Amino acid sequence: MAVIEEIIEGEEDQISKVEKLKKEGNEYFGKGEFEKANEKYQEAISECPPTSTEVHSILLSNSAAALIKQNKWEEAVEAASKAIEIGAANEKALERRAFAYSNISEKYENGIEDYKQLQESLPKRHAEFERKIREINEKINRRNEAMKADIMEKLKGFGNMCLSPFGLSTDSFEMVPNGNGGFSVQMKGAGNKKTEEEENEKNEAV
């Protein structure tokens, strides 16, 4: 019994120290000193007993919040993910991860998944999360358009390299509707020339 009591007392001392560090971190956070706040949260995490999963999860979530304030999106995702993986109920960690994802171009879709989970667990905020999902979708559209423009520019550069020995460039060609819902590539002015020839044929026929 004495051994068990010593273990319990030891954990209580640890928790007391953890809570003190957490409080200091919160104070720094409140003053806008987010780097120092995260340092305190990390120190508290290192002191947190493995059995105190809820406290551990909260500390990791707080760390994610401090990292978000510093625009350290990847690190924030990592901290929030660890908070979620611990298994303690922590919607704040999920929301913080969703927000961090929404600021990482290649991980926008992950943010949408997280916000959809939040819609299920926090139905009263469904409309708020729906708005955030729309915002991410707009970011996805802008990202995809930028990627498409970049690819087209690279293709244009490659095309110019291939055409330059013939005194041509991609500017020598144009995309025209082919009548089947698609487009064809032809030399600029070729369409006008064809139209003139057709008109001449009509006039001759008359």
Image (spheres, rainbow, N blue to C red):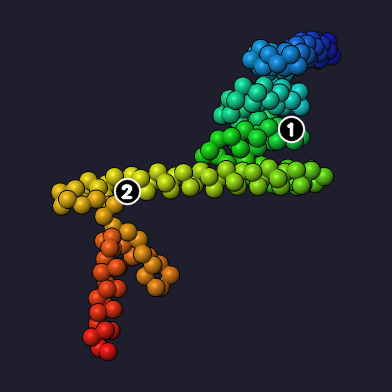
Quadrant assignment for the N terminus: top right
- Can the viewer see residue 37? no
Quadrant assignment for the C terminus: bottom left
**Circle 1: element type:** helix
* Residue found at the far left of this picture: 165
Q: Which residue is drawn at 37% across and 70% down?
A: 178
* Percent of width and height locating residue 138: 59, 46
In this view, the residue in front, 81 or 14, is 81
* Percent of width and height locating residue 51: 74, 23
According to the picture, the residue beneath numbered tag 2 turns out to be 155
Q: Residue at x 38, y 46 (%)?
A: 151
* Mark 1–mark 2 CB contact (< 8 Å): no
Count every numbered label the image shows and give the total. Answer: 2
* Label 1 environment density (alpha carbons within 10 Å; few <14, some 14–19, many ≥20): some
* Relative height, residue 185 to residue 120 (above, below): below
Mark closest to the chain's N terminus, 1 or 2: 1
- Measured in 3D between alpha carbons, the distance from the residue under mark 1 to the one under mark 2, in whole angstroms, is 45 Å
* Residue found at the far bottom of this picture: 206
Task: Kindly report which numbered mark, 1 or 2, lies closer to the viewer in this rendering.
Answer: 2
Q: What residue type is labelled 2?
A: Leu
Q: Which residue is drawn at 26% across and 66% down?
A: 190
According to the picture, the residue beneath numbered tag 1 turns out to be 92
In this view, the residue in front, 30 or 51, is 30
Q: Which amino acid does label 1 sit on?
A: Lys
